[in-house]
Amino acid sequence: GASAYILNYLMYILWALLFAFLAVSLVRVFAPYACGSGIPEIKTILSGFIIRGYLGKWTLLIKTVTLVLVVSSGLSLGKEGPLVHVACCCGNFFSSLFSKYSKNEGKRREVLSAAAAAGVSVAFGAPIGGVLFSLEEVSYYFPLKTLWRSFFAALVAAFTLRSINPFGNSRLVLFYVEYHTPWYMAELFPFILLGVFGGLWGTLFIRCNIAWCRRRKTTKLGKYPVLEVIAVTAITAIVAYPNPYTRRSTSELISELFNDCGALESSQLCDYINDPNMTRPVDDIPDRPAGVGVYTAMWQLALALIFKIVITIFTFGMKIPSGLFIPSMAVGAMAGRMVGIGVEQLAYHHHDWIIFRNWCRPGADCVTPGLYAMVGAAACLGGVTRMTVSLVVIMFELTGGLEYIVPLMAAAVTSKWVADAFGKEGIYEAHIHLNGYPFLDVKDEFTHRTLATDVMRPRRGEPPLSVLTQGSMTVEDVETLIKETDYNGFPVVVSRDSERLIGFAQRRELIPAIKNARQRQEGIVSDSVMYFTEEPPELPANSPQPLKLRRVLNLSPFTVTDHTPMETVVDIFRKLGLRQCLVTRSGRLLGIITKKDVLRHMAQMANQDPESIMFN
């Protein structure tokens, strides 16, 4: 009755608000880094930038708990992206237990690449897709040994998931489907149209979502994250409940849209008018005219599609864990199912048309609407993320539809081409630039003829480079230099006159080394001379004990000459994930190039204002 419906409606809204409020409160109080997808930040970390605390224990704990709450609240978001962040937090935690990985940033990044593969493997039940996702989308540097290690990590993750059997169907995935009809060449046209739709949806989503997130950052809206989450949750719950396709969980919705209509299906989408004389086997039901239920489902799906498109733009980027894979797939699956039903009815009522005559005879099972939903889901996900190879592999692992690789490939490539025509950035790259992370995209080409001397600091008129000398600075001098500057490290030279480069000392290693020496070594005072050589310098008899810091010195920092082409420098920064590179001439230090200098120079070469790039 009406009273039961209203009571259910109110309870649905109240539970949604409670779960969302709990999630945003936990994130805000205990782990601010637990919000969002996490993939843009993982990409930035793997490119060589350090975001302290982003992969910490609190982030892991809070993101795991709040992910359950936000998915339960019915918001238009997924758990797959955040699971990559969770997996990388686990990888970082286990790396810290072994000195081989904790003290070597390169090896730690290899572990994080493997962790990202394991995260996708668990999220989708797609171990091969996880490895390819890590290779194509997340990782910056992916050598062969990382490939098989990622493969092993994804295998163990998939094996563990299969042992737990979370869906109770003895499958790794929720969306497993079995279609009984092959696809035909004439169907490539609607598949490509779905690819075009996916590319347009991807472009629309990225532009609108980035505009909204920029507004959130630059207005008072950003100061009230709890209020924003509560408002979006309330709107989502109020609008979603009346429509059965938005009321249920998005994963269940996608599963139903992918399904083929069998004889025992009770879904509205399978409410066809049956022929009373039909005596065919259960698996091979011929195309039939749509019944009232199918037409009702069609307009409900159309409303659900519009709602999902709009609400996902405002949901992604809020201060809660939020993934984009599942909402994007839902948008594509709804559009695909409607196109599939349209093609199916067209083939049934007009089987004598030239396009249907060769392959669709009366009484045959010609068109599978669930396949169109699957292709649409791949197209929309590809349009938003710009994935191609890993997307196709994830989709066929996700559904078991190995026979349908060509339609998936056609849709994925079309959606990428269409989306790239409007802008090269995927959603993750767009959020990296919005947040101001210093990220050099491997996919961008640098073809200008500038040299390292054009980019290095200090430039003419700027103060000289802050350096440490080999054996003439006191502890107090170094502490003052560290206090007055915020650089990550300092070049070490023989003397200020010769400027001969010896090495590079990291700030994060200098500070604890001086602190420990003051506490544990006798005679170390502010006037103690610091030296970076094997033997201490000759000092007057009454001078305090000198401090040896040879062990914190990197004796082989990356250097380039002042005439090195910037194309080579950019390549070095990309492939090695460097943060800075020293510029020398005949062993004499001239300057330094940081990743931020490279990014500003690239912006200048692209006729953009280099000072407009804000680094967070």
Image (tube, grey):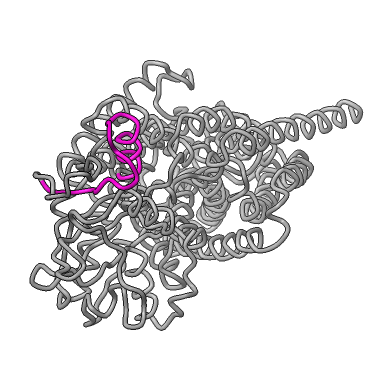
Q: Judge from the rendering whether residue 95 lies leftward or rightward of residue 274; answer left or right.
A: left
Q: Quadrant of the N terminus?
A: top right
Magenta extent: 510-533
Can residue 352 be seen here? Answer: no
Vertical placement of residue 529 versus 416, above or below: above
> Residue extending furthest right?
3
320 drawn magenta: no
529 drawn magenta: yes
**Which residue is nearer to you in this view: 334 or 185?**
334
Residue 107 in the image, given as x and y percentages of width and height: 23, 39
Residue 528 in the image, given as x and y percentages of width and height: 27, 45
Vertical placement of residue 4 versus 127, above or below: above
Can residue 1 be seen here? Answer: yes
- Say which quarter of the image contains residue 364: top left
Q: Residue at x 77, y 42 (%)?
A: 234
Q: Residue at x 57, y 41 (%)?
A: 32
Count of residue discs: 0
**Which residue is nearer to you in this view: 502 or 285?**
502
- Say which quarter of the image contains residue 444: bottom left
Q: Judge from the rendering whether residue 533 lies leftward or rightward of residue 281; answer left or right.
A: left
Q: Judge from the rendering whether residue 268 lies leftward or rightward of residue 560; answer left or right.
A: right
Vertical placement of residue 558 versus 424, above or below: above
Residue 173 in the image, given as x and y percentages of width and height: 43, 30
Q: Residue at x 85, y 30 (%)?
A: 5
**Which residue is nearer to you in this view: 236 or 105?**
105
**Which residue is nearer to you in this view: 505 or 397?**
505
Residue 240 in the image, given as x and y percentages of width and height: 73, 42
